[in-house]
Amino acid sequence: MIRFYNGRVLRFSPEMRVTEDEVWVGDGRICHVGPAPETPPAFERQIDLRGDLLIPGFKNAHTHTAMTFLRSCADDLPLDEWFYRQVLPHEALLTPERLYDFTKLGILEYLSSGITASFDMYFHNDAYAQANIECGFRTVICASLNNFDRDVENIEREYLKFNALDELVSYRLGIHAEYTTCRERMEYLVSLAHKYKEPCFAHLCETKGEVEGCLERWGMTPPQLLDSLGFFDYGGGGFHCVWMSDEDVALFARKKLWAVTNPCSNLKLASGIAPLDRLRAAGVPLAIGTDGAASNNALDFFREMYLASVLQKVQSFDAAAGGADAVLEMACVGGARAMGLTDCDDIAVGKRADLVVIDLRRPNMQPLHNIARNLVYAGSKENVRLTMVGGRVLYENGEFFVGAEPEALYEKCNAHIREMF
């Protein structure tokens, strides 16, 4: 059992607050939150927080982890040209072995950013899952059905396999996007959703052109089209959600669909700004993702939180918009619930021990007027002191404990790049 003591704890239920409780971890879960008893049990390790902050880790609710291989390779291009002329041709060269290594590279970056779980949509999922399991990292695989898949029925096989593979891995249904998936394949995915009573996800309303194209093809926006097919009958949501009509927002609110914002990627590809405050006001649940390193180019949750907040302010010319408290809850709680990780959404007895220690003794965290808002407006990766997933410390004080030596991994990844490019 591991003991965290002499520090602060960020908790979200029944409301967001910072307490001075101790937190104990055993068998991968939180087993005590509160004052120390007079006679504590024996501990395998005791971690003196020295006044630092323990938080439930950030949840990256939309990403393509192995796209680290395209970091700073396909930059300064509009989305269509970036996707069809740069991403797709190079992805054809991404073998399972290469994806496995580039996934591990992404996991290292997640851990150093305080991210404890990812909602990943990509391919070569056997290699992807193996990389995560070996590192001890938690992931939810999202199906990415599209017109390029040779074996459509593999989606169901993967759903059954990955939901039974390991406690670190789970699988949810989805399509890549309306514009890459024919109606027949969308309907097939809906049949699986109804068979297993599962939520469905997709890239949605990322660009103005995507929405206009869907309106020309179907006379409906992407959310409206998918809903007409039964895609959202058991919940789910969309990634990006930038160009949302009032009807789309009402649909998301009525069905409690998750809108996952990706502010860095949407800015870099000039896609636009997701209307988070409008969505929140309507009752739409919200989460945050980095998207892939090909369009970001970092996997840094502090950048995402800051931009998610301040973009709302500049979009509405209202400094009160994009409140930091709401953004922090999106990062820690919303992402977990969007991914189906409801036992990873808070620091409470019985929850999984997916925890991060934030160093409050760095200059950017002082003075301590408001710790939670410091995280959103002033925080950075330098403040991540420790990252734990499932009760295992995977990153601490700049060192990784994932079974892979970073320098050797960097060499392998760069060797892959020389072969591919």
Image (cartoon, helix red, strand yellow):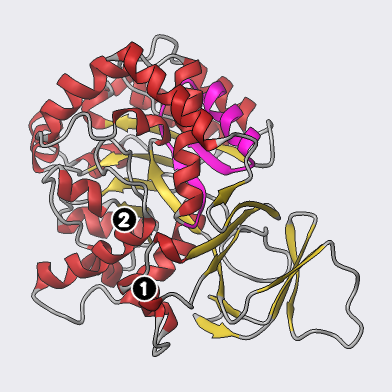
Residue at horizontal 7%, vertical 31%?
216
Label 1 belongs to which residue? 326
Residue 197 disc label: none
Q: CA distance from mark 2 to mark 1?
A: 18 Å
Q: Which quadrant: the N terminus?
A: bottom right
Residue 159 or 50: which is nearer the viewer?
50
Mark 2, Cα crowd under 10 Å, few <14 / some 14-19 / many 20+, is: many
* x then y, percent, for residue 60: 43, 50
Q: Is 268 placed left or right of 107 in the picture?
A: left
Residue at horizontal 24%, vertical 43%?
224
Q: Label 2 is placed on what type of residue?
A: Phe
Magenta region includes residue 137: yes
Q: Earlier in the sequence, mark 2 or mark 1?
A: 2
Residue at horizontal 24%, vertical 62%?
307
Magenta region includes residue 21: no
Q: Is 166 placed left or right of 205 in the picture?
A: right
Secondary-structure class at tag 1: helix
Looking at the picture, does residue 23 appear above or below residue 81?
Answer: below
Q: Label 1 is placed on what type of residue?
A: Ala
Q: Is 185 placed left or right of 139 in the picture?
A: left
Q: Which residues are magenta?
A: 114-141
Label 2 belongs to which residue? 252
Q: Nearer the viewer, mark 2 or mark 1?
A: 1
Q: Does residue 13 appear in the picture of this structure? A: no
Q: Which quadrant: the C terminus?
A: top left
Residue 361 or 117: which is nearer the viewer?
361
Mark 1, Cα crowd under 10 Å, few <14 / some 14-19 / many 20+, is: some
Q: Is 23 placed left or right of 100 in the picture?
A: right
* x then y, percent, for residue 352: 67, 58
* x then y, percent, for residue 40: 88, 78
Residue 403 or 78: which is nearer the viewer?
403
Residue at horizontal 40%, vertical 18%?
415
